[in-house]
Image: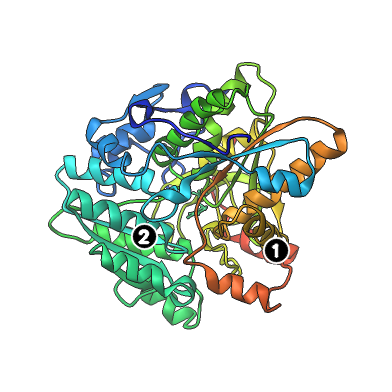
Amino acid sequence: MPTKKFLLEEKDIPRQWYNLAADLPTPMHPPLCPDGSPLKPEMLERVFPGNIIEQEVSRSRWIDIPEEILEILTLWRPAPLRRALRLEKYLKTPARIYYKDESVSPAGSHKPNTAVAQAWYNKKFGIKRLTTETGAGQWGSALAFACNLIGLKCRVYMVRISFDQKPMRKTMMQTWGAECLASPSPHTHAGRAILKEMPHTPGSLGIAISEAVEDALSDKSGKSRYTLGSVLNHVLLHQTIIGLEAKKQLKIAREKNPDVVIGCVGGGSNFAGIAFPFICDKIHGEKIEIIPVEPTACPSLTKGPFTYDFGDVAGLTPLLPMYTLGHRFVPEPIHAGGLRYHGMAPLVSHAAAQGLIKPQAYDQLKCYESALLWARTEGTIPAPETSHAIACAIDEAKKAKQEGKQKVILFCYSGHGLMDLSGYDKFLSGKLTKYALPKNKLRQSLKAIKNLPRIK
Ligand SMILES: *Cc1c(COP(=O)(O)O)cnc(C)c1O
């Protein structure tokens, strides 16, 4: 009987994170102030603690993971590497499909990997309270879980559409002791301004970020900071434990390097987690195809320009070099809430601009079809976000069959879908439609960044 699970012992958990910025063939473009002048790390100090800023700008290849963080991560890590044998058999593919199962964390996704680290560094810096935004609720619940264990207060601004579609995520956050508000909310200037302009808006991550940043900045005690669940360099860094574990586990499975590595992309963090250690191999000569998969409804990597843009709708963040649809972009309310972000992580964007990765966009109907096939072969119900990676893994396995090649496919199973069943319900009752972002909507949305600095 072929082995289905490849497990590491707790003592084999990676003890350092991998920083791709150390190995990129050309240096990253620096973040800028809104007027185009270079951003100094000190300018971030009211938003993030100093120890996190240090990681954000670090160019060291390896960064030690503090023992106390490992002590919490080992509640569920090392996460299993599994082989999708039943799916392989169904597809009659010669490919071997492996997936890193991040759904086993307490919050049900990869996000606690960075939530625990960020809460720990904030606590160490003397911070008492964290604010954040959440799309589908995965990040908010991950941070609520981490703040509870580490002893910090936590307030989460949750995108309105998800707040209504996924009320159980709010209950999870409250169970772990956090506060959860629908965004746009009447609690902030940014929220009130949007509500006045668009009272029935479904909200967006960009709006919720504006609210959470404003909230942290307006705490007069100076003991509140903001946290982000994706996009930034330090967040991607914390997720590399996924790919580093997967490398050890592929060795146990007696595989060499994978031929294809796949992850879905919203802000880019689970993709970075699984892919960056393999991008390092690729930079050093290995032949690996590395594919980030985004929704056709929010196609920053495949349709957006690579340029400077704000991370949030109000323009409170520094300007970041990224593939973007424009910071004023409000995506359609697709069910893959975690993939509804207008931009893409600068590190992932840089890797794409250098041709190190090959982005693809998938329609939500194809993703739900793949999710159903997955549930009916492998048994588990994936998050709608994760179904994008599954759809691509299935296509790659079919391609391997056509080519008659025994490829090794690795993807990140970023989370379970047990809190996302309303999306499945809509799909099963035929209420979901195909949707790709129309050209004129993109053109309209890019007007907002027309006068911002460009990448040279
Ligand atoms: C948040 C989330 C994503 C998207 O975010 P990334 O930062 O791109 O990883 C994908 N899958 C799941 C399950 C998520 O919760």
- Looking at the rendered structure, the kind of residue marked 1 is Leu
Residue 450 appears at what percent x and percent y? 60, 54
Name which quarter of the figure residue 326 lies in: bottom right
Q: Can the viewer see residue 263 in this picture?
A: yes
Q: Which mark is residue 437?
A: 1
Q: Can the viewer see residue 303 in this picture?
A: no
Q: Is residue 434 left or right of residue 33?
A: right
Q: Is residue 158 left or right of residue 1?
A: left
Q: Residue at x 60, y 22 (%)?
A: 254
Q: Residue at x 62, y 63 (%)?
A: 445
- Closer to us: mark 2 or mark 1? 2
Residue 30 appears at what percent x and percent y? 46, 34
Q: Quadrant of the C terminus?
A: top right
Identify which residue, 342 or 154, lies in the foreground: 154
Residue 293 appears at what percent x and percent y? 65, 48
Helix, strand or loop at label 2? It is helix
**Residue extending furthest toward the front:** 1
Display colour scheme:
rainbow
Mark 2 to mark 1 CA distance (whole Å): 27 Å
Q: Which mark is residue 130?
A: none
* Lower sequence index among marks 2 and 1: 2
Q: Residue at x 57, y 27 (%)?
A: 253
Above-or-below relation of 233 to 318: above
Name which quarter of the figure residue 292 lies in: top right
- Looking at the rendered structure, the kind of residue marked 2 is Gly
Q: Quadrant of the N terminus?
A: top right
Helix, strand or loop at label 1? It is loop
Q: Which mark is residue 140?
A: 2
Residue 135 appears at what percent x and percent y? 46, 63
